[in-house]
Image (tube, rainbow, N blue to C red):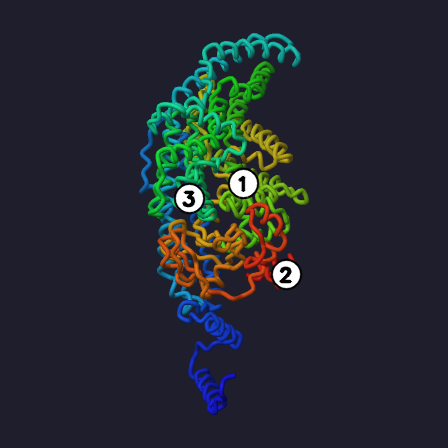
Amino acid sequence: MAPPNPSYCQNVKDLKEMLLSISKRGKNVLKISEFKARIQDLWRALLTENFLFSFKNTLEIAAYSKLEEMYGKWTWSLRSHLIQEENKQYNIINNSTDVTSNLTRSMIEKSVLPKYNETRKEIETYFKGEDAELLTQWKTNFANRFETIKEDLVIDTYKKCTDLIEQKSALNSVDQNRSRYEDQLMKKCKDLASKLNTTDVKDVQLEKEFDTMWEESMDEVKNSVLAPKILNFRIEVQNILQKEFQIENGISTNVEKMFHNESREIQRNGIWDWLPFSRYQEQTNIFKKITEDAENAANVVIKHIENRKLGYNENNIHEVIKCVQETVDSCCEHNAKLKLTNTNRLDLAICILTNAEWKFQKIHDDFQRANDPLIYFSSKKEEYFNSFKIRCKGATNTTIFADTLCSKLKAAMHQAVCDQASLYIVDKMKSECQAFNGNRSRLQNYILIHLAEKEMFEEFNEYIQKPQQYFVKYITERVEEYCSAKENNKINKILKSCLELQKKLVVNVIADATTAVQTNKGDASSWLDEFSKRLDHKFNFPRHGLVIADYKDINDIAYLTDELTKAMETMVTQLNTQYSTASLRDLEHVRNKPHDMLCEQMSGCWAQCPFCDSLCTNTILNHAEDHCTPIHRPQAVTGWSWHETNFFCTDICTSLVASDILYVLPDGKIMPYKDYRTIGREHASWSITPDLTVQPYWKWFVCRFKSDLEEFYNLQFKGSGAIPDGWTKITKDEAIADLHKK
């Protein structure tokens, strides 16, 4: 017991008088609740016996959390603006007759500048607001982060546009052939309609005559088209890997073994000799890190190949191999003792490529379907028949023109509606769904809450072993859940609302085009020129795809407008009926799908704690600050054990770094956990703050899935790895409630 301090009462009295005198003089005086929070921070820092590095300010944490939330809103405002700019540029490129484009990156930057400046002003205002004194320390950092995000978004938008230009150039011959087939088919429809127009033919006979003509035309198209190339992915993988890795024999056997390995994972037998450590957990962590990084890098490359919509070719395999090699080089750079042979790299490349086989097959099949004229015309048969039928019924050229125009406008309007709806869904989810209206840390908590509610070890294990994959899975499921809610038919309402907006836009364009042409006493051709020009960046509606040589005699623009208005009402009714039974699948064809946009917006750093694998929650991928996470885990969650035992380690990083417990490095050296930053580059980049608070979530998880963890890792919760008694009293509700507080 400490000796009595005779000055204690006097010191307390002096402190009280000092605080009261400061409160009388100062303007920015802490409230009682704020003062209490700071005293608690001070006490927590003293308990950790590492005051300088452990003093957390609760008020600062709250201010920073709110700042991160606002930052998410600012970046989404900028991202959504650039997505709309991307849609605009896509329409301009598609509507152009030139396969090249004068689009430059500076043009994209110029288009986003007003929105960027507007948002920067909002940021400046926020930093001058209520918590200005606390926020000032992060002002420069967040300004730089926002500038980085802007640059990244501009580069990404420009790249997508240049990909479209490349796609348009590559498919130019396909489009020309399709236009030629359309002209021939339209001529046959007109000739047949002229022949039947003089007789009283019933609808049944019209349909029969049309079907006969259609089948003959499709046979002609089929005979003129080359048979689609059959993809033999495995043979191509073998040949390319053999050249890339300069291996003469045995590669085909390795590839076939991997393709027939249902788990599609590299077998551990014989692979560990290329890892520098003998201890199982270090081997597992390194192997998992390399494989996951390579898989993630390959998936990004494959996603880009898919978005280009140019189909599959052998260069795609080279792209994947290159990214795998670069990922392995990066891993070796971060760990000087890690040396991979050519054979090791080959095994990893085979694993990645065999896992990707179905993706490349889908890319190949999707491209064949998208550019198969038979499939294209099959989707247009009803449109051609309706046009043919009204010709046979003696419709005027003006009526036929209006009907033909609306048939083509329908697809363009549907695309515009879906693009707008996709953005609208993300906007609504970010405002209505708690998981997405905050920062990465909040999303992380809601993922953990979701896992606890499902209470399935397989789900937890997928999240622990492949967090980035589960992140995408969670967001995708939430989008599907939001859109398929039966009680309010959200997707139907959203599509119909967007359709109404697009309808008003087209009605205004029709009126403006009509006014302009009537003033200049133009004909249908000049009206169409004016109409297409005014729709240029709003719809994918190329003027050169509309040939109206037979309608040059249409001069009554007022009558044309009336007929077009009637045809458009019919078209809108058809789309409304279609949207009444719509689902999220109806948005599969859009370039920016809701779940993809949310994943990109909520993404960030994917670094994992070197001790417990918890994810860094920073919103920037390559951020300059230290990695950090608000919730660390017991090391048992990722299979750590005490040195030379089969007992789990149940300690948590944040308590270990506040203790004198020693850490045994892979090379046998021993050092205190509190000096973890000196271990190496990966450890030095992490800020693991000593924290002796309860953090109940993962403690509940360990108790709930004790037997599952023992079976999965082949370790035991005994001896030095026994589960503390207090953990067993934590309930699931308490674990979830703690996450809701954060």
Q: Residue at 47% of width from left, 18% of height from top?
A: 230
Mark 2 element type: loop
Q: Residues within 10 Å of mark 3 (few under 14, many from 20)?
A: many
Residues at discs 3 and 1 in contact (Cβ within 8 Å): no
x, y percentage for residue 267?
48, 35
For the question of whether residue 740 can be seen, the reply is: no
Name above or below for residue 448 compared with residue 188: below
Q: Is residue 492 visible?
A: yes
Q: Residue 454: x and y, percent?
A: 64, 48
Q: Earlier in the sequence, mark 2 or mark 1?
A: 1
Q: Is residue 368 above or below residue 575?
A: above
Tell me the CA gap for discs 3 and 1. Answer: 16 Å
Q: Earlier in the sequence, mark 3 or mark 1?
A: 3
Q: Which numbered disc, 2 or 1, marks the residue closer to the eye?
A: 2
Classify mark 1: helix, strand or loop. helix
Residue at numbered disc 2: 730
Residue topped by disc 1:
421
Q: Which residue in the protein does label 3 denote?
A: 82
